[in-house]
Image (cartoon, rainbow, N blue to C red):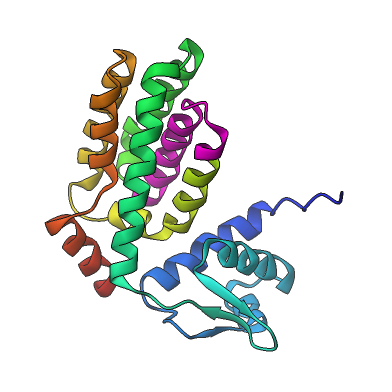
Amino acid sequence: MKKTAKPSKLSNGLREKIEELIATGVFPPGKKLDEIELAEMFNVSRTPIREALIQLNSTGLVEMRPRRGAIVSSFDPKKLYEMFEVMAELEAMCARLAARRITDEELEELIKTHKECQKKEVCENPDLYYHKNEAFHLALYKASHNSFLIEQAILLHKRLASYRRLQLRVRGRIQASLKEHEDIIKAISSGNAELASQLARNHIIIQGERFSDLMATIQNI
């Protein structure tokens, strides 16, 4: 069986740049993403651009259509909200299982990733915080010891990546996120599965003002 080539660091960076341009509306739904134009925009060859578009296709942000190439998928606020609802439940399940199954080494890793998020230079940079925050959530997923759940959580996490990054630009969100991480760790450490589940769910779900803030951020950047 032939192994799939691992995306390069360059293509991963390009994916992040393109997904943010999609999330902020610079590349609107239905726009054709021409490899040559993108290569010129980012001053790179077509190969990492193609790799980045393939990654975006796997997350649903881009559709690869025969004879048309890559097209930006339609943006639907209702679907976005529904995706965050599902993500919240997956994270809640991970936290509940982690509270029962986490090892001492995994708990140390979860605390370590949280401390990385707390660093001053990280808190002052939403994009840098996003990457450290991502490590925290991946550590949480792994602590569930449920391979299928981990797979699905990572898949949807990647699908929502650009929107989760934008959410961190809302004023005060990083500070609130840190406090929520701390509470989740305490609940998991004490073995309180139901509290850990509730806290993890609330950490992800975007209702009322939080959803309005995210929509405003998307529209105004």
* Residue interval drawn in magenta: 126-150
Q: Farthest residue toward the bottom?
A: 67
Q: In which quarter of the image is residue 13?
A: bottom right
> Residue at (18%, 52%) from the top-left corner?
171
Q: Position of residue 154 (x, y in %)?
A: 50, 45
Locate residue 103 relative to residue 122 in the image: left or right.
right
Q: Position of residue 166 (x, y in %)?
A: 33, 58
Viewer-proximal residue, 134 or 203? Answer: 203
> Residue at (24%, 73%) from the top-left corner?
220
Instruction: Relative to 18, say whether 168 is above or below.
Output: above
Q: Majority secondary structure of the magenta segment? A: helix
Is residue 125 in sight in this rendering? Answer: no
> Residue at (32%, 31%) from the top-left corner?
118
> Residue at (29%, 70%) from the top-left corner?
77
Instruction: Relative to 16, say whether 25 is above or below.
Output: below
Locate residue 83 relative to residue 146 in the image: left or right.
left
Quadrant of image for the C terminus: bottom left
Report if residue 136 lies within the magenta region. yes
Q: Position of residue 112 (x, y in %)?
A: 43, 22
Report if residue 32 lies within the magenta region. no
How many numbered markers are drawn? 0
Q: Farthest residue toward the right?
A: 1
Viewer-proximal residue, 201 or 185? Answer: 201
Q: In which quarter of the image is residue 78?
A: bottom left
Q: Where is residue 69 in the image (x, y as percent from the top left)?
A: 65, 83
Q: Farthest residue toward the left?
A: 209
Locate residue 156 relative to residue 1 in the image: left or right.
left
Is residue 30 in sight in this rendering? Answer: yes
